Amino acid sequence: MNINPSAPLSSHAGPSLEHFEAAARDSAAVYISVSGQSMQVLGIGTSPGGHSVAWVEPDIDTTRLFTEALAHSYGTGITQVIARELGLEPSPGKPLSSRTVAQALDMAQTSSQALSGVDFATRLDHSANARGAGFLDACRALDIDPASLSPQRRQEIDAAMQIRFDQAAAQGQSPVTADMAQGWLRTLLQAG
């Protein structure tokens, strides 16, 4: 199926993952075309035989646009693994099989859920409100009595930790290691 955006495509504004998913459901292959847009001339010259030639922008790379959309939704870490596993290499002018799109989406969703589960366990272990083992270890390391922290301060710490976990996930740094979470927690406790 053809995804035909109404606006010119760029590396910053390609079709969304939902466009690819919908196209993959409706046909055996997905490809990008740009309606009503002419080829962009990249250079003009003369061949060895004296003929005038022009180099034009190559066909749209559907695979590249798909991996960019995947990275936008799931992060670069997950996308790099999926691209390597499925052999998603740049291939201008060639369609992307719907089967590959479906596999990539399934892999991305499964990976994201698995990494979220790992991060949930690490987040719980380092929760100030839950008085997790990681939180208690950080307090001991800094010689802070956990009971001396008010309920409001513990909530603030957990909220700040949530932001850090969310940022790590968005940057493809999931799962967060216990050491990384411990470092964040110690910084927050010291700022205290």
Image (cartoon, rainbow, N blue to C red):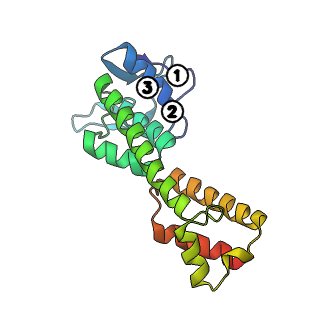
Counting from the top left corner in percent of width and height, residue 141 is at 57, 83
Label 1 element class = loop
Q: Earlier in the sequence, mark 3 or mark 1?
A: 1
Identify the residue position indicated by label 3 in the image: 20
Label 2 element class = loop
Which residue shows up at 71% across the image and 65% down it? 154
Q: Quarter of the image containing the N terminus?
A: top left
Q: Earlier in the sequence, mark 3 or mark 2?
A: 2
Q: Nearer the viewer, residue 147 or 184?
A: 147
Is the residue 141 above or below the residue 25 in the image? below
Compute the Cα span from label 3 to label 1: 12 Å
Identify the residue position indicated by label 1 in the image: 5
Question: Which amino acid type is shown beneath numbered disc 1?
Answer: Pro
Within 10 Å of the Cα at label 1, are there few (<14), some (14-19), or many (20+) other Cα atoms? some
Q: In this image, 47 relative to 108: left or right?
A: left
Identify the residue position indicated by label 2 in the image: 14
Dots 1 and 2: beta carbons under 8 Å? yes
Q: Quadrant of residue 54?
A: top left
Residue furthest bottom in the image: 143
Say whether residue 101 is visible: yes
Q: Earlier in the sequence, mark 1 or mark 2?
A: 1
Mark 3 or mark 1: which is in front? 3
